[in-house]
Image (cartoon, grey):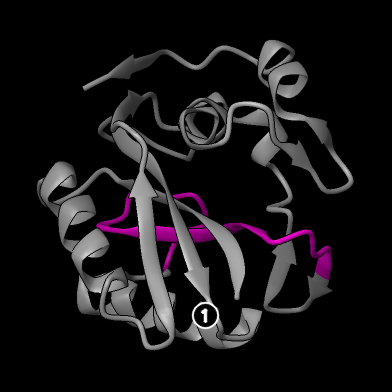
């Protein structure tokens, strides 16, 4: 069993409700246990155009699934929540990203772990620090140092 951290985000169709529903769906992933979830945070959108604010969180899981099998499960949850992949970094009903998969460093066409831009995103690092405050991120360094050096992005606990 590996400990895995999942980034959750939504800025369409009642984002808080989308995240709560996604957490419930993650509890039903085979061979996987939801260990906990951070607080929810409101953040400014980073993508193109005029988008609503995002609601973000990080969940901790324990899973016996392979990284790609877990990715398939998460993408199925996204689809069941109306996720469309039409505009990169565009508004979305639900985004579920594998941030960390144990100590693994993965570089495959469908999956990069640690998540490639997580060290630049306070809406990922701050919720992650609630779950694992002293964590070392594989290939990136200590979470407290990364959080201290992370750019500001209007972040508010909700």
Measuring from the top left, give residue 147's x and y in whole percent.
66, 19
What secondary structure is the magenta-colored segment mainly? loop
**Left or right of 92, for residue 97:** right
Measuring from the top left, give residue 79's x and y in whole percent.
29, 78
Point out the residue furthest to the right here: 139
Measuring from the top left, give residue 98's x and y in whole percent.
57, 61
Q: Say which residue label 1 marks.
A: 70
Picture quadrant where residue 114 is located:
bottom right
**Left or right of 83, for residue 61:** right
Q: Is residue 98 magenta?
A: yes
Residue drawn at x 19%, y 48% as measured from the top left: 12
**Left or right of 122, for residue 138:** right
Q: Quadrant of the N terminus?
A: bottom right
Magenta-tinted stretch:
86-106
Point out the residue furthest to the front here: 1
Q: Is residue 78 above or below residue 131?
A: below
Measuring from the top left, give residue 45's x and y in whole percent.
41, 31
Q: Is residue 86 above or below residue 43?
A: below
Q: How many marks?
A: 1
**Left or right of 156, for residue 130:** right
Residue drawn at x 18%, y 45% as measured from the top left: 15
Q: Quadrant of the C terminus?
A: top left
Q: Is residue 62 magenta?
A: no
Q: Is residue 111 above or below residue 9?
A: below
Residue drawn at x 55%, y 24% as measured from the top left: 122
Residue drawn at x 83%, y 48% as measured from the top left: 138
Picture quadrant where residue 83 is located:
bottom left
Q: Secondary structure at mark 1?
A: helix
Residue neighbourhood size for the residue with mark 1, other residues' Cα within 10 Å, grouped as few (<14), some (14–19), many (≥20): many
């Amino acid at each position: 069993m590996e400990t895995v951290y999942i980034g959750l985000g939504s800025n369409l169709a009642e984002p808080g409700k989308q995240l709560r529903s996604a957490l419930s769906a993650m509890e039903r992933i085979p061979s996987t246990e939801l260990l906990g979830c951070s607080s929810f945070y409101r953040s400014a959108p980073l993508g193109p155009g005029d988008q609503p604010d995002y609601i973000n969180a990080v969940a901790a899981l324990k899973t016996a699934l392979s990284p790609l099998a877990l990715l398939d499960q998460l993408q199925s949850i996204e689809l069941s929540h109306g996720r469309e992949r039409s505009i990169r970094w565009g508004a979305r009903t639900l985004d579920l990203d594998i941030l960390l998969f144990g100590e693994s460093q993965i570089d495959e066409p469908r999956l990069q772990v640690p998540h490639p831009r997580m060290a630049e995103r306070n809406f990922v690092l701050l919720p992650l620090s609630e779950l694992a405050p002293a964590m070392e991120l594989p290939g990136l360094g200590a979470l407290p140092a990364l959080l201290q050096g992370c750019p500001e992005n209007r972040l508010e606990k909700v």
